[in-house]
């Protein structure tokens, strides 16, 4: 069983930065990463990292977001810079899935809200 607990969300102005954290326990296969869901929209992949270290970003966040992990702390991070109002969403940490495909992920955190005002 894998447990995931996100933190670090909040409200910022456009152009600001936030760093999300996901504390993980347990063992997972394949990929782990960040997803988001805005009101009225489908959940979408943001950034994921595989067990082999391979990183994949959604086109919409390339160059602005950085995913990283601290294996010693079993924690996954998402550094978000140059935030835009369209980044406003509930952000979820997920584990044991394939790349940016939300439906493939088995374990999910409870989510943390990110709100970007213009």
Image: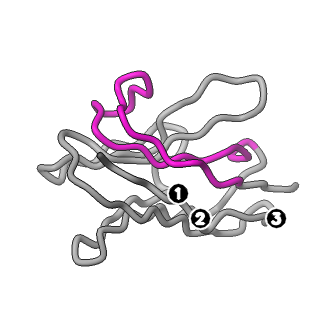
Rounded to the nearest angstrom, the CA distance separating label 2 from label 3 is 11 Å
Identify the secondary structure beneath mark 2. loop
Instruction: Pinpoint residue 8: horizontal percent, then vertical percent.
Output: 61, 68
Comparing 66 with 40, the one in front is 40
Segment colored magenta: 86-113
Crowd band around label 1 with a 10 angstrom C-alpha radius: few (<14), some (14–19), many (20+): few
| Residue at the image position 64 percent from the left and 35 percent from the top | 37
Q: Are marks 2 and 3 in contact (CB under 8 Å)?
A: no
Identify the secondary structure beneath mark 1. loop
Quarter of the picture holding the C terminus: bottom right
Going from the N terminus, do you reach mark 2 or mark 3 first?
A: 3
48 relative to 17, above or below: above
Instruction: Pinpoint residue 107: horizontal percent, then vertical percent.
Output: 39, 39
Crowd band around label 3 with a 10 angstrom C-alpha radius: few (<14), some (14–19), many (20+): some
Label for residue 96? none
Q: Is residue 103 left or right of residue 72?
A: right
Instruction: Pinpoint residue 80: horizontal percent, then vertical percent.
Output: 56, 62
The residue indicated by pointer 3 is 13
The residue indicated by pointer 1 is 64
Q: Do the residues labelled 1 and 2 touch (CB within 8 Å)?
A: yes
- Outermost residue on the bottom side: it is 72
Q: In this view, does 60 lie to the left or right of 11?
A: left
Identify the secondary structure beneath mark 3. strand
Rounded to the nearest angstrom, the CA distance separating label 1 from label 3 is 15 Å
Q: In this view, does 40 lie to the left or right of 60?
A: right
Rounded to the nearest angstrom, the CA distance separating label 1 from label 2 is 5 Å
Instruction: Pinpoint residue 109: horizontal percent, then vertical percent.
Output: 50, 48
Comparing 46 with 14, the one in front is 46
| Residue at the image position 54 percent from the left and 46 percent from the top | 92
State yes or no: residue 93 in magenta: yes
């Amino acid at each position: 069983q894998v447990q995931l607990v996100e933190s670090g969300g909040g409200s910022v102005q456009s152009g600001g930065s936030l760093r999300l954290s996901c504390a993980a326990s347990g063992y997972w296969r394949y990929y782990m990463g960040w997803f988001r869901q805005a009101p009225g929209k489908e959940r979408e992949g943001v950034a994921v990292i595989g067990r082999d270290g391979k990183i994949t970003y959604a086109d919409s966040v390339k160059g602005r977001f950085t995913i990283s992990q601290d294996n010693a702390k079993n924690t996954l991070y998402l550094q978000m810079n140059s935030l835009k109002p369209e980044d406003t969403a509930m952000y979820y940490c997920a584990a044991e899935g394939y790349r940016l495909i939300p439906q493939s992920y088995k374990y999910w955190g409870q989510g943390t809200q990110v709100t970007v005002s213009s």
